[in-house]
Image (cartoon, grey):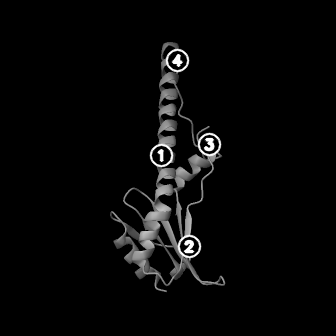
Amino acid sequence: MDMQAFAAAMAQALDGTWTVEPGHHGYGDRYLIGPDGEELHVCYSDWEKTPRVRLSASLPATLATIRHCHGNPLPSHEITVSPAKTPETVAAETARRLLPGYRVTLAETRELKQRLDDQAAARDQLAHAIAAPLGATVQTPGPSPLGHDP
């Protein structure tokens, strides 16, 4: 199966402007990047009893880390389809079966990030308001060894 051609045809069939990026498994997979930052991994697996095309949606790394660090487990967004289906049919199934739930998760996580950014800004503003009358300075914290804002 030519995954580059398959993914490119899927990208054309999906709504909006989707781009095709290389995958992690050489010729057997590709990433489709959507117009709103969606990330779909398209992978052909023929090592199972019945070959399948596996499509899974994941959050961009920074959003996945935020969800993980704040106790919000990431739901699984994955479907499999027959490799005999056309890319256009697979795109339609992806739009119907995978993207709606994934886009809800993506929106919720972006809202969580915005709330956390707003909290950090309010915390910084409060720190400066407390420090100013005392003639103190507020030091910006460095990166956490754990990789997230405490």
First along the sequence among labels 2 and 4: 2
Separation (CA) of disc 4 from disc 3: 27 Å
Point out residue 24 in the picture as x, y percentages from the top left corner.
55, 73
First along the sequence among labels 4 and 3: 3
Badge number at residue 70: 3
Say which of marks 4 and 3 sits in front. 3
Say which of marks 1 and 4 sits in front. 1
Badge number at residue 110: 1
Helix, strand or loop status at disc 1: helix
Using residue 20 as the reference point, say whether residue 139 is left or right of it: right
First along the sequence among labels 1 and 3: 3
Point out residue 81 in the picture as x, y percentages from the top left corner.
53, 76
Amino acid type assigned to the residue bearing label 1 in the image:
Arg
Q: Residue at x 56, y 36 (%)?
A: 141
- Tell whether label 3 touches label 4 (CB within 8 Å): no
First along the sequence among labels 3 and 2: 3
Say which of marks 2 and 4 sits in front. 2
First along the sequence among labels 1 and 4: 1
Amino acid type assigned to the residue bearing label 4 in the image:
Ile
Point out residue 102 in the picture as x, y percentages from the top left corner.
50, 57
To which quarter of the image does residue 44 belong? bottom right
135 and 119: which is toward the camera: 119
Badge number at residue 130: 4
Q: Residue at x 58, y 43 (%)?
A: 143
10 and 101: which is toward the camera: 101
Q: Residue at x 47, y 39 (%)?
A: 114
